[in-house]
Image: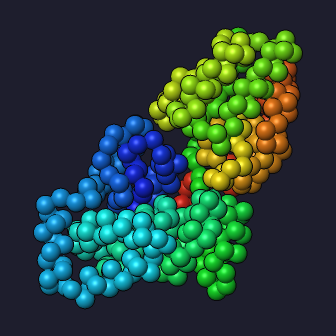
Amino acid sequence: MNKKVVFVTGCFPFGKSEVWAINELNSFQELGNEITIIPRSGKGKIINQDAVKFNSNLIDLSFFDWNIFIFLLKTIFFKPILFLKLLKENVKHSNTIIDFIKGLIILPKSIFIAEILKSKKIDHIHSLQTTSTAFLAFILSFILKVPWSYTLHTSEILNSRYKRSILFQSRSASICRTISQRTTNELSSFIGYPLSEKVVKVHLGVNVKVFKKETSHPDESFTIVTPAELTARKGHIYAIEASKMLVDMGVTNFKWFFYGSGPLHNDLQKSVKDLNLCNNCFFPGNLDHHQLLNKYEDNKVNAVVISSISTDVPEGIPVSLMEAMSYGIPVIASDCGGTKELVDGQSGILVGEKDSEATANAIFRLLESHEFRRELGNNGRIKVNQDFDTMKTASDLIKLF
């Protein structure tokens, strides 16, 4: 049965985060479901052109305006019991006074949106995040009396600081969805039995019906891409060190493009300059998601490398790797977070965290053997087809709703 599902996001389709949601939302629609997207923090600029198509599915409101204020007053005067219940739920959800204030900020907008949704006969509400985004989804569920669920991507918030809200959300949600086996185990342990019975792993996925163009001419330069925000946990410095090792080995016929933005941009560029790698390593800034996929399709990328390291923000299963693998592009990844569920040594090359030498040696193998590149790329494509097909994962998820 086709369903009407509300997706509550952090800010998607605005900004540069939650790009991984595009495949899942597309698949929900292609499967015949009706979706509505509600960003917790709306407004801004739609950076990725692939996300523009969701404009017609949006309910995009600021936290407070005159209409929301008037409706809030009506709710307080005509439905005081409902309003007091929502305040009570906010107290139960909040880990700290700051969380309670965040809940108060979200509350008026949530009540107003619930009124908009009443005529739509929604079947399910799903939050793509936890914490305050999930609380907005809970309020909608509470008022509309329809089930809701959330997705937990990593174990970043599974600590005492967030325990009250995670337990609250897990008690009230019908499904606690995770995207990797590692996070499934960690969440189940954190919330304990019987709440752990609600935890279900459903991978994020990518479009597997894609192909890259064949090329008959040899590569003049080996092109490597790392699509990741320029933050410490993405381990760019170890990729740069690997570049230096390749050059020291006499390998100079490669160009490595680090697409993304972030606080380490200037520091990383300085490292490239200090190591005399300006002819090999480049930081062009953010690249539109659609443009990146076009490069994959046009066979302009020979390898994708992700060098993430373990920090306070654990790695999930990188969609950036899935996308490259779906085009048959060989990948190299550090053994971080849930990456091993995707890159297992056969589907791609798995190296240790912070192991620049292993990364350099892996790239050298790819450079040396076209046959090895093709084999690794084919294995990766098979892996993604089997376990990370977005149509299958979306179908599995909608059945839970």
Residue 319: x, y in percent?
61, 46
- Answer yes or no: is residue 213 visible: no
Looking at the image, is 2 positioned above or below residue 237?
below
**Relative side of 376 to 151, left or right:** right
Residue 93: x, y in percent?
45, 76
Looking at the image, is 195 positioned above or below residue 149?
below
Residue at 72% across, 26% down = 240
Residue 2: x, y in percent?
42, 68
**Relative side of 89 to 286, left or right:** left
Residue 336: x, y in percent?
74, 49
| Quarter holding residue 256 | top right
- Answer yes or no: is residue 67 visible: yes
* Residue furthest bottom as drawn: 81
Residue sitting nearer the eye, 58 or 233: 233
Residue at 77% across, 51% down = 340
Looking at the image, is 16 positioned above or below residue 98?
above
Residue sitting nearer the eye, 126 or 392: 126
- Name the quarter where the N terminus is drawn: bottom left
* Residue furthest front as drawn: 97
**Relative side of 104 to 249, left or right:** left
Question: Total label count?
Answer: 0
Residue at 50% across, 79% down = 168
Residue at 56% across, 28% down = 265
| Quarter holding residue 323 | top right
